[in-house]
Image: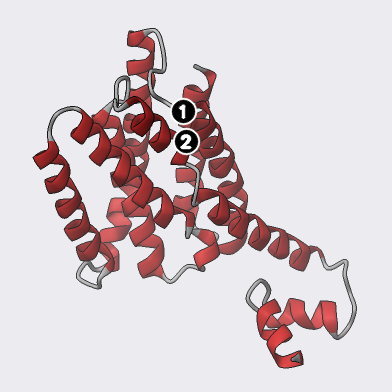
Amino acid sequence: MADFAKQLMLFVMDEKCYANYFVDFDFFDADCMKALISKGLGFGIIAGSVLVKVPQITKILKNKSGQGINLFSVCLDLLAITIHMSYSFVSGFPFSAWGDTSFLALQTALIAVLVLFYGGSASGAVAFGGVYSAITYVLMGGLTPLKYLLIAQGLNIPILLLGKLSQAYTNYRNGSTGQLSAVTCFMLLAGALARIFTSIQETGDQMMILTYGCSSFANAVIVAQ
């Protein structure tokens, strides 16, 4: 039982912090405290990401319409999420630092499929799902070298900003947010802000930190609308 408890704790902290807390009973180590908070935030974000776009999906299904949702923006958002997920996975970063992107990718892909379907293109929706699945396999299945994923990650910031700001422009042009869910937009902003801290603590990857900073800005623009 003691070994099981230790392994469970090592899931959220390293050996050094485990020794500090449970051997030396030093509960005031600043580095361990920050690491533990980061892990907690990371897993909290992952848990929230399971449902973060469900309000948006539900709204589309309820109204049988994707009116007001910019498909170009959704596709760019999905591309940015998928690149980030693939780069993090192949780089071997802890799941707590990027796991939310796997759930965001699934939900964003579903939104794109629904927008196509309710827009009158059932065949387009099916084709989109198949093509996206193939692209994800190529990026995450060991077929794409890390150096190319690093280049793609560098391009992620303009992709992300273009996607989000395209949606913001659509909202402005339409004079409303249409079928966009306010709950989803707010949760995406909160998650991006928290990810700045977890990226600093768990990966130290400057590209990831900058990406989440830009994501926070773009999400804030949409929330403000």
Q: Quadrant of residue 155?
A: top left
Give residue 67's quadrant in the image.
Answer: top left
Q: Secondary structure at mark 1?
A: loop
Question: How many numbered discs, if any?
Answer: 2
Q: Position of residue 65 (x, y in %)?
A: 29, 25
Tell me what residue is drawn at x 56 percent, y 55 percent.
47
Residue 72's place in the image compared with 130, above or below, is above
Name the kind of residue labelled 2 in the image.
Answer: Pro
State left or right for residue 138 relative to residue 57.
left
Residue 67 in the figure: left or right of residue 103: left
Q: CA distance from mark 2 to mark 1?
A: 6 Å
Q: Provide the secondary structure element on which disc 2 rests.
A: helix
Q: Are marks 2 and 1 in contact (CB under 8 Å)?
A: yes
Q: Is residue 11 left or right of residue 225?
A: right
Q: Is residue 185 left or right of residue 201?
A: left
Residue at image mark 1 = 181
Q: Which residue is mark 2?
A: 55
**What's under tag 1, amino acid-wise?**
Ser
* As drawn, 27 above or below 126: below
Label 2 or label 1, whichever comes before in sequence order:
2
Q: Position of residue 160 (x, y in %)?
A: 36, 37
